[in-house]
Image: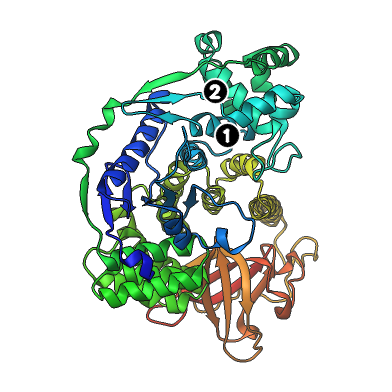
């Protein structure tokens, strides 16, 4: 809901070509804020013309008139005594990014933290695993820009950076290059550190030193590093002897006066031309609710979303905010009707369609109709926002479950990675798509880069699972090839053997304990395969049961007539080894072979469960 103090304010929305600003500080301040962000974006375009700058999701900026207004949106910073009160904050979400900042604050660049994080968002759009020192150095370099009327000063050293460089012993270049997110040198929460200061100094040198610019050192480093994946090797080839380069940087970092660059920003257009309107109370409440969801304040989000729906029952954004609050708390069954209601109303955003599909994927596809709806909603999300990577990734994973759709699955998976290379989840999903398509070498090459880039515990675990899956797939392929070779040898021996009754030995003709190849009636239905981790399994020896499979963060529910009639394999055939008992299936990786069913409360009828 809109707090009483904020309800008295007049709220304005200003839309520039790339940003939406919601402000209670007046239209002039809203235009100024939008203009500053347009200028900052133009600095990146001027400095790196080939970089992609469209995030693929809206960036909503709350430009608030004072600290009291900011406190309403960010109560957590005032709940703990002694907690620093920010001038601004950047919050990144799957479907929207948000900024909240105060406009009544002085200083050359009071929003340095905001611009720093926005710089990271742009870098993640263009690089999968940018070296940590380079990522932080670039974010510091551009984040500390000074925005003027028609130009931006870049390369400005902040006071804490200069003091750190003057007073501290620098990190040896080879060690700095090898530092990752787990390195003792790197602390994301402590930007007043040698690591940040030295990273900034190197980037400052590479971008502003005349000799470094003439030799195109930064561009050459990136070219060699992207080809080799080894940044120490790339630094040696680009910068030469690293000891000498360390001496160069030591002298450069001790400068008392750092040069400054200037970027003209007149291309962006006249801020007076930006569209503006009075923000309706219902929309304000809906955007507040979405902001609270992304800052993990579910109680405030629920109240604001309910207020939005009460103020305007025809506003799709209010229902979407309600749904997203439920969705982020993993209450998918209660979230889906809210997204569904949003889709029924005029003007529903791409994100409503995406999250409606995501709810069904998280719950588990149950029927042919739900399956069709998920495909349709993901395709609608893409039609409304062709730059939205999550929709491509999830749609690609769905298509990869169907043997006849592998080309389309790979096309969609690759598109997601290209749109958001900094998100390893999409790369991991694409690697699974490659594996399902039998492109093992490509999957292995991608998995190697993913392992190199992974640094969060979840990314590392997902990367390791991917590597294990590829290794298992290769082993099974070798086993299958060996069995095929032995079978061919056996056929050749049989063809050349004397006529008469022949009783082959067990070694010559491997026998399984259960012959499923006898002359049984052929089932003319098409069989499908899905690969993932078993999340739940009912163990009913003589009656119907269900199995739930998690596939790339989505769930599929299957039915079987009885365990006695279900083929359960370890490896590729019944004689490959002993499969785990049903009670131990949960958590095991498996392939499920099934017949697709129509208009049933499950995705398919199981024929075979294959563990590996």
Per the image, the residue denoted by label 1 is 135
- Quadrant (top left, top right, bottom left, bottom right) of the C terminus: bottom right
Q: Is residue 139 left or right of residue 198?
A: left
User: What separation in Å lies between label 2 and label 1 (alpha carbons)?
Assistant: 16 Å
Q: Quadrant of the N terminus?
A: bottom left
Residue 229 appears in the picture as rendered: no
Name above or below for residue 42 compared with residue 501: above
Q: Position of residue 580 (x, y in %)?
A: 74, 73
Q: Which mark is residue 223?
A: 2
Residue at far bottom of view: 542
The residue drawn where x is 27% and y is 64% is 348
247 to 11, vertically: above or below: above
525 and 18: which one is in front? 18
Quadrant in the rendering for residue 236 = top right
Q: Pinpoint residue 291: horizontal percent, then vertical percent.
A: 43, 60
Is residue 78 or residue 452 the one in the foreground?
78
Q: Residues within 10 Å of mark 1 (few under 14, many from 20)?
A: many
Residue at image position (56%, 21%) is: 204
Q: Which one is nearer the viewer's eye here, 502 or 167?
A: 167
- Image x and y of residue 364, in percent: 49, 73
Q: Is residue 501 above or below residue 460?
A: below
- Residue at (62% x, 33% y) in the render: 131
Density class for disc 2 (Cα within 10 Å; few <14, some 14-19, many ≥20) is some
The numbered dot on residue 450 is: none
């Amino acid at each position: 809901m809109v707090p009483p103090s904020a309800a008295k304010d007049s709220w304005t929305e200003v839309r520039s070509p790339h940003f939406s600003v919601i402000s209670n500080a007046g239209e002039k301040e809203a235009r100024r804020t939008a203009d500053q962000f347009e200028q900052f974006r133009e600095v990146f375009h001027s400095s790196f013309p080939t970089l992609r700058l469209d995030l693929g999701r809206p960036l909503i900026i709350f430009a608030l008139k004072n600290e009291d207004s900011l406190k309403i949106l960010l109560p957590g910073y005032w709940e703990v005594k002694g907690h620093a009160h920010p001038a601004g904050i950047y919050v990144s979400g799957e479907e929207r990014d948000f900024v909240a900042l105060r406009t009544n604050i002085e200083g050359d660049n009071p929003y340095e933290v905001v611009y720093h994080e926005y710089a990271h968002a742009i870098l993640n759009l263009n690089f999968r695993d940018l070296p940590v020192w380079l990522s932080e150095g670039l974010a510091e370099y551009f984040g500390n820009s000074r925005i003027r009327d028609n130009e931006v000063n870049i390369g400005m050293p902040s006071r804490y950076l200069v003091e750190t460089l003057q007073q501290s012993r620098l990190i040896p270049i080879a060690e700095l290059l090898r530092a990752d997110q787990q390195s003792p040198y790197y602390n994301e929460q402590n930007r007043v550190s040698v690591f940040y200061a030295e990273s900034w100094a190197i980037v400052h040198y590479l971008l502003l030193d005349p000799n470094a610019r003439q030799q195109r050192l930064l561009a050459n480093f990136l070219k060699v590093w992207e080809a080799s994946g080894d940044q120490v090797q790339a630094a040696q080839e680009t910068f030469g002897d690293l000891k000498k380069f360390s001496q160069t940087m030591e002298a450069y970092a001790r400068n008392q006066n750092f040069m400054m660059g200037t970027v003209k920003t007149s291309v962006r257009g006249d801020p007076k031309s930006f569209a503006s309107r009075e923000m309706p109370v219902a929309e304000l409440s809906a955007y507040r609710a979405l902001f609270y969801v992304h800052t993990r304040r579910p109680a405030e989000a629920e109240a604001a979303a309910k207020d939005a729906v009460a103020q305007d029952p025809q506003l799709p954004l209010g229902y979407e905010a309600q749904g997203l609050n439920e969705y982020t708390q993993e209450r998918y069954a209660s979230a889906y009707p809210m997204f569904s209601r949003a889709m029924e109303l005029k003007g529903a955003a791409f994100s409503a369609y995406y999250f409606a599909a995501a709810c069904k994927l998280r719950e588990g596809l149950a029927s042919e109709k739900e399956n069709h709806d998920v495909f349709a909603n993901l395709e609608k999300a893409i039609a409304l926002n062709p730059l939205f990577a999550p929709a491509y990734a999830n749609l690609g994973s769905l298509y990869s479950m169907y043997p006849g759709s592998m080309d389309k699955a790979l096309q969609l998976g690759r598109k997601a990675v290209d749109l958001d290379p900094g998100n390893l989840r999409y790369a991991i999903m694409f690697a699974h798509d490659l594996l399902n398509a039998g492109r093992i070498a490509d999957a292995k090459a991608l998995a190697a880069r993913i392992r190199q880039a992974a640094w969060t515990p979840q990314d590392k675990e997902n990367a390791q699972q991917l590597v294990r899956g590829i290794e298992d797939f290769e082993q099974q392929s070798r086993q299958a090839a060996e069995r095929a070779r032995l079978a061919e040898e056996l056929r050749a021996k049989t063809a050349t053997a004397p006529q008469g009754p022949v009783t082959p030995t067990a070694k010559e003709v491997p026998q399984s304990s259960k012959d499923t190849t006898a002359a049984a009636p052929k089932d003319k239905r098409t069989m499908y395969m899905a690969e993932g981790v078993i999340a739940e399994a009912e163990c009913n020896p003589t009656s119907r049961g269900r199995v739930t499979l998690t596939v790339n963060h989505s769930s599929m529910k299957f039915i079987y007539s009885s365990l006695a009639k279900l083929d359960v394999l370890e490896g590729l055939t019944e004689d490959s080894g002993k499969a785990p008992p049903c009670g131990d299936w949960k958590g095991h990786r498996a392939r499920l072979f099934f017949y697709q069913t129509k208009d049933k409360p499950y995705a398919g009828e199981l024929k075979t469960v294959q563990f590996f």
